[in-house]
Amino acid sequence: MIDDDERLERIVSAVLDEMLTSAWHIGEAMTVLTEEEYAAQDQAHADRDGERLLALRDAAVRRVLRPEAERIALKELRRAA
């Protein structure tokens, strides 16, 4: 049996995965990168390391979108209760 924290985390993960299919969400998230995230992505691009660049972008976008995904997940969890 899974507890509420695990259930919440599964919903958050699913919501984030769904948000990452939206060019709008990704574009919005990319506008609020930290200096470090931007510099790391810029370096990966300069190094022509596409795999690293995509991993960095994914991590940054997930960081930015996570609070909204958590809000949506909590709402879904409460609705299901």
Image: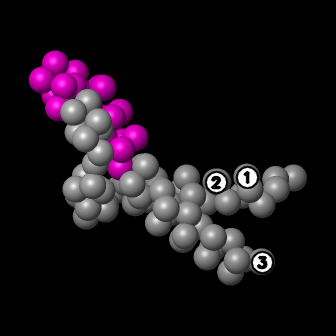
Asked which secondary structure carries label 3, the reply is loop
Q: Are marks 2 and 3 in contact (CB under 8 Å)?
A: no
Question: In screen coordinates, is 7 left or right of 61?
Answer: right
Is residue 25 positioned above or below 55 on the image? below
Q: CA distance from mark 2 to mark 1?
A: 6 Å
Specify the amino acid type for callout 3: Ala
Q: Which residues are magenta?
A: 41-61
Using the image, determine if residue 80 lies above or below residue 55.
Answer: below
Which quadrant would residue 41 be assigned to in this image?
top left
Residue 76 position, x and y percent, is 63, 74
Q: How would you classify the magenta stretch by its main secondary structure?
A: helix
Tell me whether the residue at label 2 lies in contact with that at label 1, contact meaning CB atoms closer than 8 angstroms. Answer: yes
Which disc number belongs to residue 6? 1
* Amino acid type, callout 1: Glu
In 3D space, how far apart are the residues under numbered discs 3 and 1 (Cα atoms)?
A: 15 Å
Residue 72: horizontal and vertical position, in percent? 54, 71
Q: Residue at x 70, y 77 (%)?
A: 78
Task: Classify 10 Å Cα crowding around label 3: few (below 14), some (14-19), many (20 and above).
Answer: few
Label disc, if present, on residue 81 of the rendered structure: 3
Per the image, label 1 sits on a secondary structure element best described as helix
**Residue 56 in magenta stretch:** yes
For disc 2, the neighbor class at 10 Å (few under 14, some 14 to 19, many from 20) is: few
Expressed as whole percent of the image width and height from the top left, the position of residue 10 reads 64, 54
